[in-house]
Image (cartoon, rainbow, N blue to C red):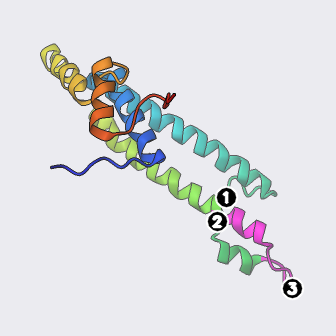
């Protein structure tokens, strides 16, 4: 018998979101567009936050790559150690720069996905499989089955 899915709130939220994305985007083309939009929104937001953090560092450092926290500490005037907040912000900037570099790499790989086009009969197969993988969670049969199999009601408990 297969292992039961995790019932923790984070996993449950992930399962619901996963299934919703399949139900609402059941074709290859829709999945391509969804993933591209998600990647671009992540890059836009992370890039803007990085710019804002770099601006707070002042004196034109927004254009120059920020040094690692240890280099920042070494470049501080003698007798003036960077505060924990400054070190934390420098680490955040370095982390966001790494995230942005990874996102650019992912973008380059994802561009290849857009070269793929499939015929309509294959898109129909995507729709069929999507219905099997992520059936409508509000379907009465699905709600009853979930209660029976998992003993975790999908609706709030209404005990007398």
At numbered mark 2, what does the secondary structure look like: helix, strand or loop? Answer: helix
Q: Position of residue 146 (x, y in %)?
A: 31, 32
Neighbor class of circle 3 (other Cα within 10 Å; few <14, some 14-19, many 20+) is few
SS class of the residue under badge 3?
loop
Give x and y (percent) for residue 89: 71, 62
Is residue 11 in view? yes
Q: Residues within 10 Å of mark 1 (few under 14, many from 20)?
A: few
From the viewer's perspective, is residue 155 above or below residue 82?
Answer: above
Compare marks 3 and 2 and give the one earlier in the sequence: 3
Q: Residue at x 73, y 58 (%)?
A: 61
Asked which secondary structure carries label 1, the reply is loop
| Above or below 2: residue 117 | above
Q: Badge 3 is on which residue?
A: 79
Q: From this viewpoint, is residue 65 visible?
A: no
Q: Which residue is mark 1?
A: 64
Q: Nearer the observer, disc 1 or disc 2? A: 2
């Amino acid at each position: 018998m297969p292992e039961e899915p995790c019932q923790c709130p984070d996993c449950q939220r992930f399962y619901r979101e996963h299934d919703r994305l399949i139900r609402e985007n059941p074709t290859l083309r829709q999945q391509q567009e969804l993933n591209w939009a998600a990647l671009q929104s992540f890059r836009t937001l992370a890039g803007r936050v990085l710019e804002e953090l770099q601006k707070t560092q002042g004196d034109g450092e927004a254009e120059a790559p920020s040094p690692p926290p240890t280099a920042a500490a070494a470049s501080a005037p003698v007798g003036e150690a960077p505060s924990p907040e400054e070190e934390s912000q420098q680490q955040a900037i370095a982390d966001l720069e790494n995230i942005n570099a990874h996102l650019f790499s992912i973008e380059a790989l994802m561009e290849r996905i857009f070269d793929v086009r499939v015929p309509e009969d294959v898109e129909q197969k995507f729709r069929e499989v999507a219905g099997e993988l992520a059936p409508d969670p509000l379907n009465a049969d699905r709600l009853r089955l979930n209660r029976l199999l998992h003993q975790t009601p999908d609706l709030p408990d209404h005990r007398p």
